[in-house]
Amino acid sequence: MGLGRDFNALLGTQFLGAFNDNLFKQLVLLLAVDTLFPGKDMQGFAFAVFALPFVLFSGAAGDLSEKHSKRSIIVRMKIAEIAIMALGIGALLMVPRQGGAAGYAWPALLGVLFVMGTQSAFFGPAKYGVIPEIVPGQQLVRANGSIAMTTFLAALFGIGLGGPLLDWFGPQVAPPATPKLWMPGVVCVGLAVVGTAVARLMRPLPALRPDLTVGLNPFGRLWGTIKMLSAEKGLMRLVLLNSFFWFNCGAISQSINGMSLPAYLDMQAKTEVSYLTSIMSVGIVVGSLLAPRLAKRVSLAGLVMGGTTLMVATQAGLLTIGTVVDRAHGAFGVALVLLGLAGVAGAILVVPIQSYLQAAPPPGKRGQTFAVNNFMNFLFMFLAGVFYQSAVGSLGPTVAQAVGGGLFFGWMLFIRRDIRAMHIEGHAEPA
């Protein structure tokens, strides 16, 4: 049985938006590794700049998602996406040929990433908060599995396409060919237009709290919601578990690009980097399909704790890249297998967490709950960018991502009682 027209429209517009975000962000991250700054890895700055708006604006975004119709916010944010992708074309046009000075290209690219992050910060609470309004409680795990699957399928296409597009149209193309890096930007504008049309297929929804006052404080009712979540059912500790997961994912995604350097996998073409990011996204798609099925046989706590353990174990395996095995002795294949398994494990653990965080808060508080969730997730992703930028020079990319996994695993063990208490009304826990 399908989940209905409204959910299908949400699924479609989420897919196209995630495709845009991941494609443009991956282009910038790849340019930040060795191209704009020869011999340097500057990804951490770009990663932090994209995450910063979520830290600044998630509170206000959560308030707005309760005061106004979530469907209306989704449509307006998709319209804004069209303009932002157009700005992206201009920033890409500034990128010089390889070996040329970065000039204005780097601040322009960072500026677009910041605006992209701002748009996503206002889109997120409405996107996740609307799901319980259009999907019954017993279908939440299934709905979130679909959201996770399509999000990471979009990441698969977006991140996977970034490397080849940079090889085909980027600053390193051999003369007499002319770089045409603006072409990916045109694709992103087109996807934003289609995504806006799909979003409009959602039927109008009422605002849940139209009398809510939204103040000038950019953090909105963030602190009050954090206190409410801290007082109920261990919700805040589970939000932090979700945030540690995204810190860990941020460390992994940057380390994948970092492993392209000669000391690790010695990847000459950016397309090879896309193989690694794509295999992890494939794993996440597979895990998203498995999670609802496994939830019929395994408790939510079992999925979270088992998935976390498997994910961190695969990250420990990545420590062998450049130490035990090198490119000539199968390191690329080892990386493919481990990253694919990490993706499967990540989806299996995050789908039940997302579902529980939607079901547990009372109606009228879900948008604000996901504002806190967004705030904390991207605060941790911002910190992942700062951490990676400061640690990669001394630790290297594989150790940096392993540290992220260790922090995630440690928090999971610390809150294991809260994890075991997770339960969604209408969802039958296996005996």
Image (cartoon, helix red, strand yellow):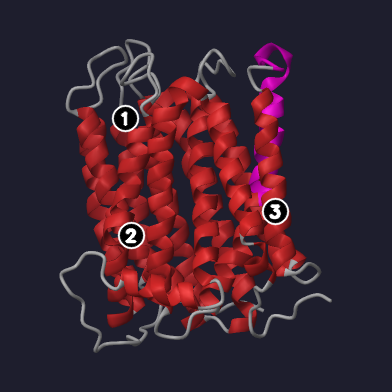
Q: Are marks 3 and 1 in contact (CB under 8 Å)?
A: no
Give the image quarter of residue 354: bottom right
Label 3 or label 1, whichever lies nearer to me, is 3
Q: Amino acid at mark 1?
A: Leu
Is residue 239 shown left or right of residue 122?
A: right
Residue 291 colored in magenta in the image: no
Q: Are marks 2 and 1 in contact (CB under 8 Å)?
A: no
In what element is the residue under mark 2? helix
Q: Which residues are magenta?
A: 324-345
Q: Residue at x 29, y 64 (%)?
A: 77
Label 2 or label 3, whichever lies nearer to me, is 3
- Per the model, the C-alpha gap separating discs 3 and 1 is 39 Å
Q: Earlier in the sequence, mark 3 or mark 1?
A: 1
Characterize the local packing of mark 2: few (<14), some (14-19) or many (20 or more) Cα atoms within 10 angstroms: many
Q: Earlier in the sequence, mark 2 or mark 3?
A: 2
Q: In the rendered image, which residue does mark 3 sit on?
A: 307
Question: Of 50 and 16, which appears nearest the observer?
Answer: 50
Q: Residue at x 33, y 34 (%)?
A: 45
Q: Residue at x 25, y 14 (%)?
A: 100
Q: Is residue 179 above or below residue 300?
A: above
In what element is the residue under mark 1? loop
Percent x, y of residue 156: 54, 44
In what element is the residue under mark 3? helix
Question: Of 124 and 395, which appears nearest the observer?
Answer: 395
- Per the model, the C-alpha gap separating discs 2 and 3 is 27 Å
Residue 181, labelled with which disc?
1
